[in-house]
Amino acid sequence: MARINLIRAGRRVGKLLVLRRAGTNKRGRLWLCICDCGRKKLINTNSLRVVKSCGCMYRGGRFQSFVGKRFGRLFVMRDSGERQKDSGARMWSCRCDCGRDKLVASCDLTKTNGTQSCGCLFLEHCATIRRTHGARSMDVPPGVKRAYSSWSNMRTRCLNPNSINWKDYGGAGITVHKAWLGPNGFRAFLADMGQRPEGTTLDRRNAFEGYNPNNCRWADAETQANNQRRFYVDGKPPAEVIAGCEPIAPGAEW
């Protein structure tokens, strides 16, 4: 076998590409090489006479092309013929399920939690985290947006001690229905209350009780004004107090 007289960065030996010199050991110089399969390996100068790969040629057969294989959303179309600049790994031309093409290195495809898409998978994940109900989107009905505003203000008044209205709500023991809290709280609120009609706001039938499906309604400004706690008698709403009063006989004195 012919002797390798000159080893330098960029030289190819079998499936190995020499990247750079990486020190010495008792056998002589060491070279950092990368195999066509994407793995890197330190190899002695004399060993490059016989070593032709990182070992993949002797682990269950020779190295196979990635063409036609699928990695997550990526389908490998062809070998681009290019090399990754920093590592020298082979670059494969892949097509994502979304239709975009992307060059991906061998090692990035095969490593644990490697590249699975052109980047659309990450963007969708970020959108899922940030988007909980979509009530602020431009394409939702105005009634849903109004309902979301009422739901958000209700939570602030009852749950945030820094709110200017805290002392009259959360500080006064006014609570929020458990199902109306959490990541799916607004969906539950909308299902119970429906869309908020124009000209109305969220009102509690009994102003001394918390926010829950049985105690809440959409009410106009007049109804809200007549349902203030200062009009209550012994904890009863004004309507109940008036209903419980005996009618005054005609001509009777006060």
Image (spheres, helix red, strand yellow):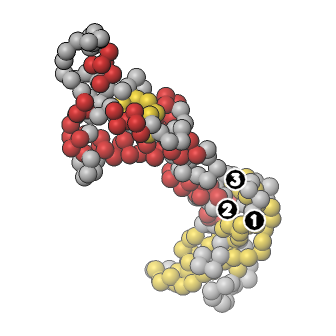
Label of residue 144 in the image = none
Q: Looking at numbered disc 3 in the image, what kind of residue is underneath it?
A: Arg
Q: Looking at numbered disc 2 in the image, what kind of residue is underneath it?
A: Cys
Mark with earlier residue (3, 2): 3
Along the line of sight, which residue is nearer the eye, 125 or 93?
A: 125
Label of residue 118 in the image = 2
Can residue 125 be seen here?
no
Q: Measure how far apart labels 1 and 2 are at the Cα level.
A: 7 Å
Q: Is residue 107 left or right of residue 68?
A: left
The answer to whether mark 3 and mark 2 are in CB contact below 8 A is: yes
User: Residue 240 at x, y = what percent?
Assistant: 31, 18
Near mark 1 (Cα within 10 A), the count class, few <14, some 14-19 or many ≥20, is: some
User: Residue 134 at x, y = what percent?
Assistant: 56, 47
Along the line of sight, which residue is nearer the eye, 171 or 118?
A: 171
Can residue 233 be seen here?
yes
Residue at mark 3: 73
Along the line of sight, which residue is nearer the eye, 161 or 104?
A: 161
Residue at mark 1: 101
Q: Looking at numbered disc 1 in the image, what kind of residue is underneath it?
A: Asp
